[in-house]
Amino acid sequence: MIRFSHACKRYPGGYDALNQVNFHMPRGQMAFLTGHSGAGKSTLLKLIALLERASRGQVFVNGRNLAKISRKRIPFFRRNIGIIFQDHQLLFDRTVFDNVALPLIIAGLPQRDIGKRVRAALDKV
């Protein structure tokens, strides 16, 4: 579940990327986020992933008010969401296998399971 309630994001210099955004997307629903360049699509996604914070209003993910999540708890929150960056955010000093395995290692999965899951994921691409 994702819900925005009067969410705003103002950047330094007074630029409003989002202003009074309101919507509710129930769990399991699929949606497409479209708009022209500069419409605030990336900003909206950054708020959901806690890469940035709303300037005003509220953002909820799975019933949690993101404004109440402390900086040290953000990595734990992100373990429950998937983020695919436009610019890939890969570690270029590592192999493809290692890049895919890294989140599983951080999550503490057993090494034998990591190998199986990485190979299964890479077989799909």
Image (cartoon, rainbow, N blue to C red):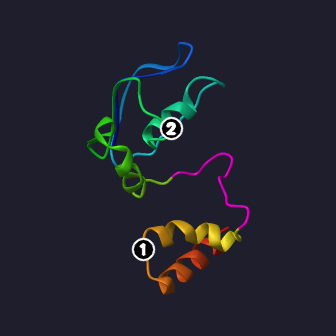
Lower sequence index among marks 1 and 2: 2
- Residue 87 shown in magenta: yes
SS class of the residue under badge 2? helix
User: Residue visible at 47% across and 40% down?
Assistant: 31
Q: What amino acid is found at the position of numbered circle 2 in the picture?
A: Lys
Say whether residue 28 is visible: no
Q: Is residue 1 left or right of residue 39?
A: left
Q: CA distance from mark 1 to mark 2?
A: 25 Å
Residue with the most extreme front position: 72
Q: Position of residue 53 (x, y in %)?
A: 43, 33
Q: Quadrant of residue 99?
A: bottom right
User: Residue visible at 66% across and 25% down?
Assistant: 37
| Frontmost residue, 62 versus 106 | 106
Say whether residue 32 is visible: yes
Instruction: Name the residue beneath numbered marker 2.
Output: 46
- Crowd band around label 1 with a 10 angstrom C-alpha radius: few (<14), some (14–19), many (20+): few
Q: Position of residue 33 (x, y in %)?
A: 53, 35
Q: Which residues are magenta?
A: 83-93
Instruction: Name the residue beneath numbered marker 1.
Output: 108
- Residue 122 shown in magenta: no
Q: Position of residue 72 (x, y in %)?
A: 37, 50
**Which quarter of the rendering shows the N terminus?**
top left
User: Residue visible at 43% across and 77% down?
Assistant: 109
| Frontmost residue, 71 versus 108 | 71
| Frontmost residue, 46 versus 94 | 94
95 in relation to 22, above or below:
below
**Which quarter of the rendering shows the C terminus?**
bottom right
SS class of the residue under badge 1? loop
